[in-house]
Image: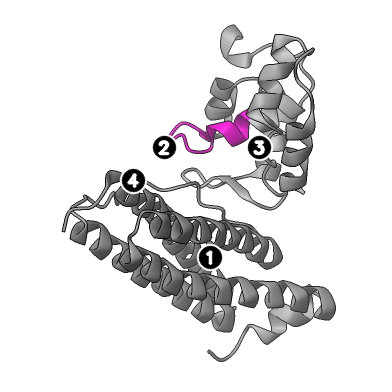
Amino acid sequence: MKSGQPIIDLLNRLLVSELTAINQYFLAAKICQDKGLHRLGHHLRKESIGEMKHAEALIERILYLGGLPNLQKLDKIHVAENVPDQLRADLELERGTVRSLNEGVKTARAAGDAGTATLLEELLEGAEDHVHWLEAQIGLVESLGVAQYLAEQMHGE
Amino acid sequence: MHDAARSEAKAIDTGSLPGIVKSIIKIGPPRRTPDRFMYVCICRAVTLSHLRAIVASGAATLDDVEGACGAGGDCGTCRNDIRRVLAEAPPSREPQSKAA
């Protein structure tokens, strides 16, 4: 199926966010695991793989619409030296993704592309869940203190 | 906070302002500098605190910073962040790379 270039460009812009998130979360996951924060590292790794599935869905949609997915473009990856700053950096990235997906849904609907709009709504649900999780973690860091929060992140999955 | 600053910038009547001020308002407020404990340059593993120490010790240009720690000399993604850190520093220093 051939579709308008604006929708393909929109999907490619969203793909940049997903590819950036894959790398940012994966690196953060591995740093956590390296420091012995296995529980948090496991969760971040799962989030990274979730972003890869989102990227896959966008890539398939772009190809279906007759475009070429751009996998060589990434935004700056934000990696922190400590967990609270990493959670804040991840929250900033994910909130940006929620904003972009909301705008994307509107644009796709306005262009009469319900298939793209539905896909973006599905991705939006995942991104909002992730924002919710990050906000909860930052709240826990504030209420428990960094040391107690990190102690809870050492064991288990 | 960033969004609030942006809307504030939009609300200013730019009609009577000099060109340079207009161009600053058009660009909008500067992007937030990276947090204190962030890596500025992933390629060379340079943190913001390390970069600030290099700038405090006299680095005044992108070339100075690259010469001191390599930051900015690989993929270049962090160059804008380095520029922002350089802009925060006192402006009176001579570039080290010029003297070298």
Of the residues under marks 2 and 3, which one precedes in the sequence? 3
Q: Is residue A108 above or below residue B32?
A: below
Which residues, given as a range, are shown in magenta? B70-83
Determine the image quadrant of residue B27: top right
Horizontal side of B65 relative to A107 (left or right) equals: right
Q: At which x and y percent is residue A13? A: 40, 49
| CB-based contact (under 8 Å), mark 1 and mark 4 | no
The circle drawn on residue B51 is 3
Name the residue beneath numbered marker 1: A28
Tell me the distance, in whole angstroms, between the alpha carbons under discs 1 and 4.
33 Å
Please indicate, yes or no, whether residue B78 appears anywhere in the rendered image: yes
Amino acid at pointer 4: Pro
Q: At which x and y percent is residue A30? A: 48, 69
Tell me the distance, in whole angstroms, between the alpha carbons under discs 4 and 3.
40 Å
Q: Is residue A41 above or below residue A9?
A: below
Residue at image point 59% right, 89% down: A155
Of the residues under marks 1 and 4, which one precedes in the sequence? 4
Residue at image point 76% right, 26% down: B89
